Amino acid sequence: MKTDRRDFLKQMTVLTAAAAMPGVVASADAASKVSPRKVKPGRKVRLACVGIGNRGNEVFKQFEATDLCDFVALCDIDMGAPQTLEIIEKYPDVPRYQDFRKMFKEMGKKIDAVYVATPDHSHFPICMLAMSLGINVYVEKPMAHSFYECELMMEAEKKYGVVTQMGNQGHSEENYFQFKAWKEAGIIRNVRAITAHMNNSRRWHGWDHKMQSYFPEQPVPSTLDWDSWLCGEMHHPYSKDFVNGQWRCWYDFGMGALGDWGAHLIDTAHEFLELGLPTEINMLRAEGHNPFFYPYSSTIEFKFPARGDMPPVDITWYDGLDNIPPVPEGYGKVELDPNIPSVAGGKIQPAELNPGKIIYSDELTFKGGSHGSPLQIIPESKAKEWESRLPHVPDESNFSNHFANFLLACQGVEKPRSPFSVAGPLSQVFCLGVIAQQLNARLKFDPQTKQFTNSPVANLLLRRGIPRKGWEEFYLL
């Protein structure tokens, strides 16, 4: 990717002194000398919020509940939207911004940390600018919109020495501690295959996959800063079907069902089985494939090579209402897991098979739900046989939750559980899967060179194109 980065920069428009926000992005050299923000234990973290509507509203309340931070700045591209007004009215004296660049320019020295709960395509510039200023970063999953952006964010984490955390909250809940304990005790070993499935209705189900263009342009709401919403993406005329969660439907802005739920389903397996990056990504099914939005149903096979004494692992991802994976004998009930949190204010609806995973090893088969839901050995008779051999699993109630963990890490009290060094390769797996979805192809990938070996077009999609004018600078931080 180092060579790829130089090639990328050669293709960009020659940078001029007129940066988008002079004194912030243009001063990247000065920013690189800024020390990371350290917060003394016991002092509240001065937290800025980028995104306070929809999911951002929920993230705000989670941080608020920790009582470990003070909110020092609020930023959202639509400060007049109904979903943002609750936060604004509760904290009327906190400075407000529609452009994160202006917020960091005016408030940067007063901010210890920032959370980013915005559409996938906008994570990268906000996080990169914050890290370049020494500001600690919490960003919702997936980490970024492209493989290359994840790579640069991991580099920036090291370069600037900041605390980072990706917002897959289950990585601080029961499944995290259980998987770690069972792996260390040898209960989970010799894993050969994993099935991960999210078979609930998605926003784009029912759209016409034969569409020839995006939805018609509509008037931009008077309270919305559409240009800032687009960030570095090429210009698109405004449509209500790009905003308020609809962005997840489109290749241009979101990461589909895989990017949305993958981090809640395969995160612990990816970390504790040390999976890294796959060597093959095979699109096995793409029902309703089209150039604009995600398929109605996708089956994607990821092939991970052997690691040390651990065998190769195949992960097969299923999404779509009519794309239910096979389950082993003795699987048991498929009722909705009560541990799954609300999504944008509402519970997901029960499906034929609710979000979860099946892990197949040489000795045992494990059934698991989503987020922090614990694993079970199946069938029940096998679980009883192994019950006396299971190790003690630390009680998650004795540990900080994902939000408190980040703030305590900013204070140097704990280490973050999903830093960019851990979450970055996981997010890159999703980026590779999305490329296979977009091309509806079988792809071979070299984890060492971080390039596809059988598709020049797929290699172009590792970067998702050139950022529009005024947004190139974030790739230089």
Image (tube, rainbow, N blue to C red):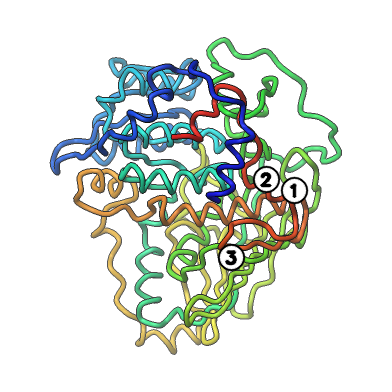
Q: How far apart, in angstroms, are the residues tagged by discs 1 and 2?
A: 7 Å
Which SS class for mark 2? helix
Question: Which disc number belongs to residue 177?
Answer: none
Q: Are marks 1 and 2 in contact (CB under 8 Å)?
A: yes
What amino acid type is highlighted by mark number 1? Val
Q: How far apart, in angstroms, are the residues tagged by discs 3 and 2?
A: 37 Å
Seen from the viewer's position, the closer of residues 134 and 418 is 134
Q: Is residue 174 above or below residue 151?
A: below
What amino acid type is highlighted by mark number 3? Val
Residue 306: name its quadrant: bottom right
What amino acid type is highlighted by mark number 2? Leu
Q: Please report whichever mark, 3 or 2, sits nearer to the chain's N-terminal start.
A: 3
Point 47% across, 74% down: residue: 376
Find disc 3 in the rendering and name its residue: 334
Seen from the viewer's position, the closer of residues 28 and 414 is 28
Point 19% across, 51% down: residue: 413
Find disc 2 in the rendering and name its residue: 461
Seen from the viewer's position, the closer of residues 382 and 97 is 97
